[in-house]
Image (tube, rainbow, N blue to C red):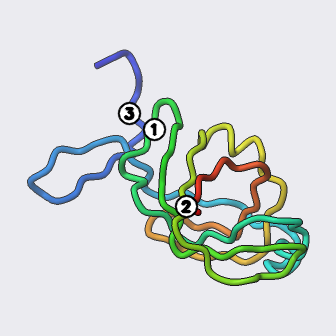
């Protein structure tokens, strides 16, 4: 239609919905360090297992504004405890340029198969 060949990557919410551009099988190659070593290498940061609000991110620009939940605080390689009210407000495409560690653990999340990934200098907002 636009002069491009289909890649076959589409998804839809249900049979009654129209297809939209969507990843159907994304696999991230594992690294060569353990998840524990990935955490031990952090001066300060967060462990984020999931986010809320990703559906409202802009896939064209890469702008994201999501709530990190569940989330834990890390200081000098030690997990201190749970964090609440943390929002990641960054550009995902720029974050991909700031990957500074990939672990050897691999998990499946829906269409995504990925190890733990560490990013540097992620922009976050918190409540005091």
Is label 3 or label 1 in front? 1
Q: Quadrant of residue 36?
A: bottom right
The residue at which mark 1 appears reads as: 59
- Label for residue 127? 2
Task: Measuring from the top left, give residue 79's x and y in whole percent.
Answer: 77, 82
Residue that lies at the very extreme toward the top in this rendered image: 3
Question: Gap in Å between the C-alphas at discs 3 and 1?
Answer: 18 Å
Task: Measuring from the top left, give residue 88's x and y in whole percent.
Answer: 57, 53
> Decide: marks 3, 1 in contact (CB < 8 A)?
no
Question: Gap in Å between the C-alphas at discs 2 and 3?
Answer: 44 Å
Is label 2 or label 3 in front? 2
With respect to residue 5, does 41 lie above or below?
below
Which SS class for mark 3?
loop
Which SS class for mark 1?
loop
Task: Measuring from the top left, give residue 18's x and y in whole percent.
Answer: 17, 44
Give the quarter of the figure containing the N terminus. Answer: top left
Residue that lies at the very extreme toward the left in this rendered image: 16
Identify the residue at horizontal 51%, vertical 30% (top origin): 61
Query: Which is more toward the observer, 107 or 60?
Result: 60
Give the quarter of the figure containing the C terminus. Answer: bottom right
In primary-sequence order, the first of circles 3 and 1 is: 3
In primary-sequence order, the first of circles 2 and 3 is: 3
In the displayed structure, does residue 70 sit left or right of residue 41? left
In the displayed structure, does residue 4 sit left or right of residue 91? left
Query: Which is more toward the observer, 72 or 30?
Result: 72
Identify the residue at horizontal 41%, vertical 22% (top origin): 4
Identify the residue at horizontal 45%, vertical 38% (top origin): 59
Residue that lies at the very extreme toward the front in this rendered image: 128
The residue at which mark 3 appears reads as: 6
Task: Measuring from the top left, give residue 55's x and y in whole percent.
Answer: 36, 51
């Amino acid at each position: 239609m636009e002069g491009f060949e289909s890649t076959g990557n589409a998804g839809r919410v249900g049979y009654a919905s129209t297809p939209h551009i969507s990843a159907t099988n994304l696999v991230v190659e594992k690294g060569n360090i353990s998840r524990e070593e990935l955490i031990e290498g952090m001066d300060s940061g967060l462990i984020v297992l999931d986010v809320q609000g990703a559906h409202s991110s802009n896939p064209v620009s890469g702008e994201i504004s999501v709530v990190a939940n569940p989330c834990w605080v890390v200081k000098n390689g030690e997990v201190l405890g749970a964090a609440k009210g943390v929002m990641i407000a960054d550009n995902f495409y720029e974050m991909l340029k700031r990957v500074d560690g990939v672990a050897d653990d691999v998990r499946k999340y829906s269409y995504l198969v990925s190890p733990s990934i560490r990013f540097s200098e992620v922009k976050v907002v918190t409540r005091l």
